[in-house]
Amino acid sequence: MEKDLDGRFERLEKALNNMIDSVVKNNPSEQLAEELVAAQDDVMAGLKLLETHQNNYARIQQLRREVSRYDDQIKDIINSLWQMRKELVAVTATPPGGSKYQFTTEELLTFARQISRKTLPLPGVLNSYLDANTARPAEPESQTAQTPNTSFNFGLSNASIGTPGPMSASTPNTAANDTTTQQTSQLPPSQPYTKPPTTEEKLPAHLKPAVNPLLEASFQPWPTAEQIRSGALADIQRLVDKGIDPKNYDPAEEERKRVAEEQAKKEAEEQARREREEAERRMREERERMARERERARQMEAVASGAGGRGAERRDSVAVGMGRAANKPKQFTFLGADDDDEDDEDD
Amino acid sequence: MDSGPMSVDSSTLDPPAPPKNTTDEPKYGGHSRFELELEFVQSLANPLYLNYLASRKFLTNPAFVAYLDYLQYWTRPPYLKYLTHPTASLKMLQLLQKEKFRQDIMSPDLAQAMMVEGVKAAVEWHREP
């Protein structure tokens, strides 16, 4: 580029010198002047070219800078990636080969819902714990902190007796509770109207659970002793204590069986009673029928014998009287009939 | 409960089926084996219960130890999801596999300390940032 420009300048200089010479010699030549103009145009074109060249060069420089910046950036990224990879490799998260179980989101949510109440105390309990924690650090345990060795005894003997065990770990807490309750109960007699009650409104102790259901609530991240004592295993223990083999023994089933048996027994009794009544009724009807037949037979006989003598009438009346008498005590009906027959035969 | 020899021969038992076809299964006092074992594993979460078991010499009974080993099926699906106190239950079950812990839990002090720690952890775990 420089050589090209130098050439053009030389040409311009030469043309200019020639022109000057010709002017100095007072012999200007048109040809020289045109040469000078052409040389000048040439230089101008060269300068234009130079400008383009410079612009291009600047552009190249700029691009180079960008390239180097991006190169640095790439290097940084690669460097940090490498670092990251090194850290990742260094982290030993789960031991390889550890158990990984498949589960669905729904299962996970169900499980979370199921355990949420058991793993985190309700806000009220939490607050009371935190309050108590500042004053009495071991407050929540106080309710279950009685005598570890005896608190799970299922037997009748132990259930009824709240044995104060050899362990005295619970005594400070329970004592603390006791003192609070005693304070509340003893407050009115100890300070009767000496100190006017402050504007602070205090509910009587027996009304507190009504406004705050969580008052007595406690939280333990495991099943409580009461829950264990009222569970199925305790049921079985009670069965064993009664001498019943719990295997294949279902109290509900047994109860159902017992009720069914009673029902069947009742029904059988009812059935027997009905049958007895039915038999009695049939017997009564039979007797009445026979009595009616006998009556009819007697009347027929009376008609057949016509307006017989007095004896016949007397016998009839006797027979009727006997029939009436026989109708009253029913067990003599057949005897009466027999008598009648004999009477008839005798006649 | 009696601390005599246990009648549970857990070595030959497979874990009970999860509750779906429990109709023809033998029942114990009206409860299925699944229910009973679930309840027992959950109960193990209570340190005082463990102390009670230890004090009744259950934890030194080889049959009972074998039963505890057998109960580890609760660490696997599909049984895992039925635990309502999974952390405490499974941790205790894990601890109970160690003989030292089975001996140490005889101490009421340890049970008491575990209770205090357990409640503290349960209350405070979510407060951490």
Image (spheres, grey):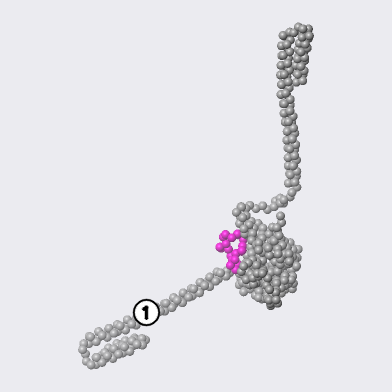
Quarter-of-image position of residue A22: top right
x 21%, y 90%: residue: A308
Q: Residue furthest left?
A: A307
Image vertical order of residue B67 relative to residue A342, above or below: above
| Residue A286 in picture, x, y percent from top left | 34, 81
- Image quarter (top left, top right, bottom left or bottom right) of the N terminus of chain A: top right
Residue B72 shows in the view: no
B14 part of magenta stretch: yes
Residue A142 shows in the view: yes
Q: Is residue B49 left or right of residue A316?
A: right
Q: Chain of mark 1?
A: A
Magenta-drawn stretch, dominant element (helix, strand or loop): loop
| Residue A309 in picture, x, y percent from top left | 22, 92
Q: Which residue is mark 1?
A: A282
Sort mark 1 into few (<14), some (14-19) or many (20+) by Cα contacts within 10 Å: few
A3 or A187: which is nearer to us? A187
- Image quarter (top left, top right, bottom left or bottom right) of the C terminus of chain A: bottom left
Considering the numbered disc 1 on the image, is that residue within a helix, a strand or a loop? helix
Point out the stretch of residues depicted in magenta.
B11-35
Residue type at mark 1 is Arg
Q: Is residue A14 left or right of residue B82?
A: right
Q: Is residue A340 left or right of residue A104?
A: left
B52 or A138: which is nearer to us? A138
Quarter-of-image position of residue B14: bottom right
x 76%, y 16%: residue: A9
x 76%, y 13%: residue: A16
B74 part of magenta stretch: no
| Residue B16 in picture, x, y percent from top left | 62, 61
x 71%, y 60%: residue: B124
